[in-house]
Image (spheres, rainbow, N blue to C red):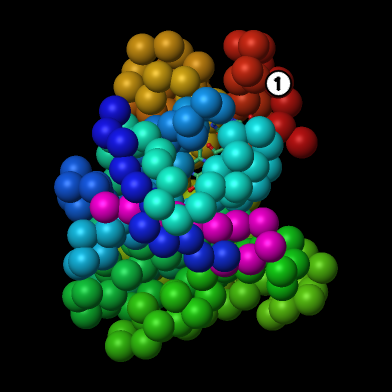
Amino acid sequence: MRTVRIEKIVNENPRVKTFYFKDKLCQNARPGQFLMVWIPGVDEIPLSVSGVYPNGLASVTVAKVGEATEAMHKLKQNDLIGVRGPFGNHFEISGNKFLLIGGGTGMASLAFLAEKMAEKPCEITFIIGAKSAHELLFLERVRKALSGIKSKVMVFTEDGSFGLKGLATDPLSSLLKQESYDMIYVCGPEPMIRKAFLAAKEADISFQASLERIMRCGVGVCGSCMIGKYRVCRDGPVFNSRQLKEVIDELGKYKINFDGRKIRIH
Ligand SMILES: Cc1cc2nc3c(=O)[nH]c(=O)nc-3n(C[C@H](O)[C@H](O)[C@H](O)COP(=O)(O)OP(=O)(O)OC[C@H]3O[C@@H](n4cnc5c(N)ncnc54)[C@H](O)[C@@H]3O)c2cc1C
Ligand code: FES
């Protein structure tokens, strides 16, 4: 584990902060990869790399949901954290016409992916979903990244407080009837991934999604992150259409709890 100093903290919304730090290995991180981040004295948690910048900085973007993430939100500039990784595979950029669907903190790796894609000529439709206007993440960052290419950004909030009212997956069936894409990329809550995957399968469009599971070791040893025959930390976190088809009985329906029991996702 490397110890790094927090160089900058940005409040993204009332529940989410981005932490910037300098780390050589993270400079090579690709969108979709994650770090195991040690919050001193509290816990170690998996967090996606949300960006890598030319000035040597990298970032993680963290929603406050429980003990470790609350402790991380209390950290200040110049405090120290530990990082292991980057771990896991990454989104493969294949083709030149893409549909990206991001929900909640899933936007961390998808905004990073959109920035990488937009370095080369391509066409991107980006659907961003959030519970409410307060929880929207990286809308301006995405708009800026896509400003130089042919693109469309659609925003859905569950309470209708910004953009269109509904879920990010709501426009999918009509969109996929009108348009074709080389690849659909999704990161967000697993029920959302399931819905998007079934719509992509129906339209016969290739698909990649990043999954989240409870992680302890982060390197394929402990088995706490299983979905079907796969370990999300080692075989993922990004899975393609073929792999998701193999785990369709669990995808968006069941996860492994902290005590190792399989429980239903609500
Ligand atoms: C590959 C991967 C990438 C992730 N990237 C991000 C990210 O970029 N930003 C972000 O805010 N969160 C991300 N997460 C989720 C993040 O790891 C959890 O929110 C965090 O571990 C919760 O810790 P806690 O102690 O604050 O909450 P807890 O009190 O432990 O739990 C609160 C909630 O978080 C879930 N959770 C707890 N621990 C984990 C864990 N180790 N893995 C997955 N879910 C967990 C629990 O099921 C519960 O619903 C990612 C998870 C994975 C597996
Ligand atoms: S976190 Fe231990 S096997 Fe994946």
Q: Nearer the viewer, residue 185 or 27?
A: 27
Which quadrant would residue 69 be assigned to in this image? top right
Q: Residue 16 placed where, x, y %? A: 60, 57
What residue does disc 1 label? 263
Q: Amino acid at mark 1?
A: Ile
Q: Nearer the viewer, residue 191 or 12?
A: 12
Residue 77 located left or right of residue 7: right
The N terminus: image quadrant:
top left
Which quadrant would residue 164 be assigned to in this image? bottom right
Q: Is residue 196 magenta?
A: no
The C terminus: image quadrant:
top right
Q: Residue 67 placed where, x, y %? A: 66, 33
Picture layout, residue 125 above or below residue 24: below
Residue 213 located left or right of residue 266: left
Residue 66 located left or right of residue 1: right
Q: How many marks?
A: 1
Q: Main secondary structure of the magenta part?
A: strand
The stretch of residues the image draws in magenta is: 12-22
Neighbours of disc 1 within 10 Å: few (<14), some (14-19), many (20+): few
Quadrant in which ligand 1 is drawn: top right
Q: Residue at x 67, y 71 (%)?
A: 156
Picture layout, residue 215 above or below residue 189: above
Numbered disc 1: secondary structure: strand
Picture layout, residue 89 above or below residue 74: above
